[in-house]
Image (cartoon, rainbow, N blue to C red):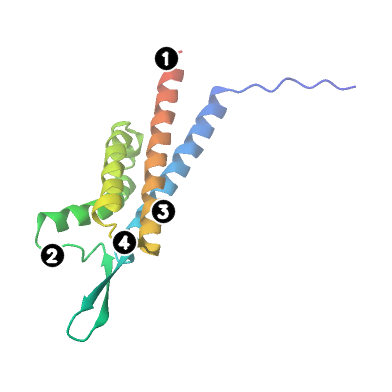
């Protein structure tokens, strides 16, 4: 019977897996940014209001569909906040594409986590005015993907720092 050497993890294997993990996280972030940019122009929610008309004794039904790009009138601080909430992941992705050294800084995911929370607040409280539509689901899934990829990236950086210290 032939004996084989036990499997050992080397530093090169760890670095290769770390590189693949960071590259996958960057791909998830870019994809989520693209979907969030698309969701800016999709219907987010629908609100139906029924009001009785005493003159004609009928019920008038008014349906309002909320889009992120038209939720607030431009120019206003609320509109700027909405555009910023939907565009910051795309701007971060473009910046990281042109400056790859930015991908290796742990301050980026530390900044992305609260930004994701702000977008989540905006989607849940400010732009959610009734029945959610497919744009709201796409935006929510995209921002959740951004949040969890930033959190994963932060854990990877912490593990890398811990491994270098030992």
Task: Return the disc, 3 or 1, that comes first in the chain's sequence.
Answer: 3
Circles 4 and 3, Cβ within 8 Å, touching? The answer is no
The disc label shown at residue 121, or none: none
Q: What residue is rendered at 17% in x and 85% in y?
A: 55
For the residues labelled 3 and 2, the Cα–Cα distance comes to: 29 Å
Mark 3 to mark 1 CA distance (whole Å): 33 Å
Which circle marks residue 73 in the picture? 2
Report if the CB atoms under discs 3 and 1 are less than 8 Å apart: no
- The image shows residue 81 at horizontal and vertical percentages of 18, 52
Cα–Cα span, label 4 and label 3: 27 Å
Q: Secondary structure at mark 1?
A: helix
- Tags 2 and 4 in contact by the CB under 8 Å rule? no
Residue 57, can we see it? yes
| Residue occupied by mark 4 | 130
- Does label 1 or label 2 sit earlier along the sequence? 2
Q: Which residue is mark 1?
A: 165
Secondary structure of residue under mark 3: helix
Q: Nearer the viewer, residue 39 or 104?
A: 39
Question: Residue 158 sits in which quadrant?
Answer: top left
Q: Residue at x 43, y 24 (%)?
A: 160
Q: Classify mark 4: helix, strand or loop.
A: loop
Q: Between disc 3 and disc 2, whose residue precedes?
A: 3
Image quadrant in which you'd find residue 129: bottom left
Which residue is pictured at 61% across the width and 23% down the height? 9
Residue with the mark numbered 3? 31
* In the displayed structure image, the side of residue 38 where residue 118 appears, left or right: left
Which element carries disc 2, helix, strand or loop?
loop
Crowd tier of the residue under label 2, counting other residues whose Cα lies within 10 Å: few below 14, some 14–19, many 20 or above: few
Image coordinates for residue 39, horizontal then vertical, percent: 34, 61
């Amino acid at each position: 019977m032939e004996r084989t050497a036990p499997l050992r993890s080397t530093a090169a294997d760890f670095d290769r897996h770390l590189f693949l993990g960071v590259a996958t996280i960057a791909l998830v972030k870019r994809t989520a940014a693209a979907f969030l940019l698309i969701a800016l122009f999709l219907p987010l929610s629908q609100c139906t209001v029924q009001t009785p008309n005493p003159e004609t004794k009928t019920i008038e039904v008014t349906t309002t569909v909320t889009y992120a790009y038209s939720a607030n009138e431009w120019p206003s601080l609320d509109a700027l906040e909405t555009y910023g909430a939907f565009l910051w992941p795309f701007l971060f992705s473009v910046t990281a594409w042109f400056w790859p050294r930015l991908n290796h800084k742990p301050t980026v995911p530390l900044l992305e986590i609260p930004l994701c929370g702000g977008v989540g607040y905006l989607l849940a409280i400010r732009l959610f005015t009734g029945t959610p539509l497919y744009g709201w689901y796409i935006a929510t899934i995209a921002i959740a993907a951004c949040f969890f990829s930033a959190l994963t990236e932060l854990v990877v950086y912490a593990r890398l720092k811990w491994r270098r210290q030992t």
